[in-house]
């Protein structure tokens, strides 16, 4: 069926605004869907024709991301956050109550086409759940009363813009500040210091500071900027990775809400150092509500001479654009993020080459975390030596932590590197007995009660910033099961080990949960762990079984009480293998040890 005149007019307006540029396909699809409700086949055909891409290529991008839909899903699209912390707060019962009142099943569209209700991955609101997205706008602190009121508004077909404003309020919950969150910098102050030093001297200060990436990997920021600066290319780019999709992490949300100037200033300093004229901030789709406020900050910086041409009167041109994602955890991986920025499905690239030499549009690109770029402003203002004296010898500066779960005061905590997990828990207010702490989200490490004196630092526990706390009433099997389903849902499907392995593990966890599992199934999960560790294309597959491995190792009774039969002797001594694995110096060594067990 051909597109109507109204549809064509709306679509052409979007295409013109995006310059008919295929590399901006993500923004074209998002704005089109917001205008028309969904991405129909005729609309995809018209988009492909206009940007000069094969239709299959456009449809591939539209079909990859969770927040794009190529069939009608109702005027009201309600997605409940299904992170484990939301489950602990009762999200499943609330969602079921909503579905019963709307007379529909989860995952289905109502018969009148008005509404659909489903689950989605973590929405970055772990400190104020249960949370949901309605037409991709965040709603926090859901209650039975709010469910009833929301159902009434949907039935009355009240526009979302007219819903109570307090429902959409997102709190920052900053509980502890240190050198970054407690800074007194005014916009332009750090940038002026960087420009006064010059690009080469500023790079030396970054290297002297010991600043390392805050996204989890911890690569030296100075080395990355230097490699990008020295790479040959027609243009250089700076990308801010604000796609914090790791369940339990929400620090970047707060930085972008309260410290957006600092983040943009850090991007500008990076642009000065590497010789870039353009920066791109990739904002996760769940933070759609931040798009307009961020655009306002950018406009204010341009008006103040902090962005655009001849910045602060110097011969330095640099500007920034915000690009919105569409619900794909894998885009947190830097090469997948670049693919998405280019209008493609967010699948990780084969490396080498690395983004610093062949990144956005094939040009030298530095990709840094939100917190890393904000911290660069402190180095610019106070110098590398000052910054290096904060934290530990191998972990300079401070770390912002997102704390959620069974604590009295969930929220944002900033400490110098080297703080113990126990100290963080004390400050957050432990409610009763702490059974476990999941550090750095599902892809990180699960700490037991006897490990809480370990320190947050690259030399002990590196982390992207998430701490999810579980008291002694929580079932650690169900925690791991939730994480297994998260990875199965978020696998990009590019490589067979991850695509199949994550699904197999999730199904085996479900089998154990229903009381139909056996020790054979545990053996199968370990086989998947060994397989994915060695054969997956990217870090998602390599880390997908970490929660299962850790919880089975440290909380094995939670699994054994679900086994149908314990009258079984495994083909290899699992306890002995785990004991030896625990003695290894790190997770990779432990995985390598288990991979060498011949009889499985």
Image: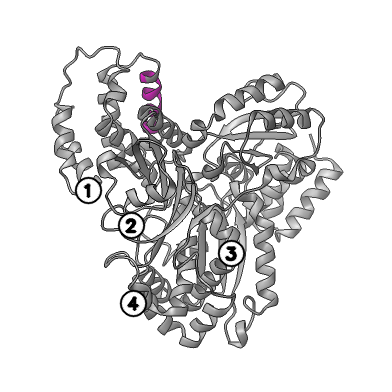
Q: Nearer the viewer, mark 3 or mark 2?
A: 2
User: Whole-Å distance between the Cαs marked 3 and 4?
Assistant: 25 Å
Distance from Cα at disc 2 to Cα at disc 1 = 20 Å
Observer-side mark, 2 or 1, equals 2
Q: Which residue is mark 2?
A: 419
Q: Relative to 383, does residue 323 appear above or below in the rendering?
A: above
Q: Residue at x 55, y 69 (%)?
A: 262
Return the disc, 4 or 1, that comes first in the chain's sequence.
Answer: 4
Describe residue 202's horizontal placement relative to residue 126 as left or right: left
Characterize the local packing of mark 2: few (<14), some (14-19) or many (20 or more) Cα atoms within 10 angstroms. Answer: some
Residue 417 position, x and y percent, is 34, 61
Spatial separation of the CA atoms under disc 3 and disc 2 = 26 Å
Where does label 4 land, which residue? Answer: 208
Alpha carbon of mark 3 to alpha carbon of mark 1: how far? 36 Å
The residue that mark 3 highlights is: 260
- Indicate which disc residue 586 carries: 1
**Closest to the observer, 430 or 46:** 430
Indicate the position of residue 434 as horizontal and vertical percent values. Answer: 35, 37
């Amino acid at each position: 069926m051909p597109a109507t005149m109204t549809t064509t007019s709306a679509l052409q307006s979007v295409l013109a605004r995006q310059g008919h540029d295929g590399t901006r396909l993500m923004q074209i699809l998002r704005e089109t869907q917001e205008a028309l409700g969904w991405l129909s086949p005729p609309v995809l055909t018209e988009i492909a024709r206009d940007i000069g891409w094969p239709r299959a290529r456009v449809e591939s991008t539209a079909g990859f991301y969770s927040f794009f839909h190529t069939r009608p899903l109702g005027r009201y699209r309600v997605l409940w956050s299904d992170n484990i912390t939301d489950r602990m707060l009762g999200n499943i019962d609330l969602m079921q109550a909503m579905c019963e009142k709307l007379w529909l099943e989860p995952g289905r569209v109502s018969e009148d086409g008005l509404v659909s209700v489903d689950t989605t991955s973590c929405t970055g609101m772990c400190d104020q759940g249960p949370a949901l997205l309605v037409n991709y706008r965040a709603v926090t602190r859901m209650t039975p009363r709010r469910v009833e009121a929301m159902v009434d508004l949907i039935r009355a077909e009240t526009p979302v813009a007219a819903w109570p404003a307090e429902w959409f309020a997102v709190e920052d919950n900053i509980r502890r500040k240190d050198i970054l969150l407690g800074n007194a910098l005014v916009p332009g102050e750090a940038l002026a210091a960087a420009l006064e030093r010059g690009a080469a001297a500023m790079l030396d200060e970054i290297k002297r500071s010991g600043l390392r990436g805050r996204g989890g990997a911890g690569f030296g920021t100075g080395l990355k900027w230097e490699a990008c600066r020295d790479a040959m290319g027609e243009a250089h780019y700076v990308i801010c990775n604000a796609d914090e999709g790791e369940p339990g992490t929400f620090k970047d949300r707060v930085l972008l809400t309260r410290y957006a100037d600092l983040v943009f200033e850090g991007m500008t300093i990076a642009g000065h150092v590497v010789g870039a004229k353009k920066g791109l901030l990739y904002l996760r789709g769940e933070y759609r509500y931040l798009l307009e406020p961020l655009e306002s900050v950018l406009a204010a910086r341009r008006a103040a001479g902090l962005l655009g041409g001849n910045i602060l009167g110097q011969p330095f041109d640099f500007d920034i654009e915000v690009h919105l994602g569409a619900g794909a955890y894998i885009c947190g991986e830097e090469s997948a993020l670049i693919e998405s920025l280019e209008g493609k499905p967010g699948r990780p690239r084969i490396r080498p080459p690395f983004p610093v030499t062949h990144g956005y549009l094939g040009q030298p690109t530095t990709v840094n975390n939100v917190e890393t770029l904000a911290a660069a402003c402190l180095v610019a203002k106070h110098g590398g030596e000052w910054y290096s004296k904060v934290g530990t010898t191998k972990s300079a500066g401070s770390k912002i932590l997102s704390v959620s779960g069974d604590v009295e005061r969930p929220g944002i905590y900033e400490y110098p590197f080297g703080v113990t997990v126990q100290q963080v828990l004390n400050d957050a207010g432990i409610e009763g007995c702490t059974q476990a702490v999941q550090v750095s989200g599902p892809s990180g490490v699960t700490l037991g009660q006897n490990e809480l004196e370990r320190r947050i630092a690259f030399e002990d526990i590196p982390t992207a910033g998430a701490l999810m706390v579980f008291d002694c009433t929580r079932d650690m099997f169900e925690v791991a099961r939730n994480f297994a389903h998260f990875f199965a849902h978020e696998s990009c499907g590019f490589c067979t080990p991850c695509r199949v392995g994550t699904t197999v593990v999730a199904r085996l966890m479900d089998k154990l949960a229903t009381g139909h599992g056996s020790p054979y199934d545990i053996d199968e999960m370990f086989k998947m762990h060994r397989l994915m560790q060695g054969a997956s294309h990217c870090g998602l597959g390599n880390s997908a079984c970490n929660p299962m491995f850790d919880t089975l190792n440290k909380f094995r009774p939670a699994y054994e009480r679900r086994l149908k039969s314990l009258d079984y002797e495994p083909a290899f001594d699992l306890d002995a293998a785990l004991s030896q694995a625990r003695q290894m110096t790190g997770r990779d060594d432990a995985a390598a040890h288990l991979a060498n067990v011949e009889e499985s």
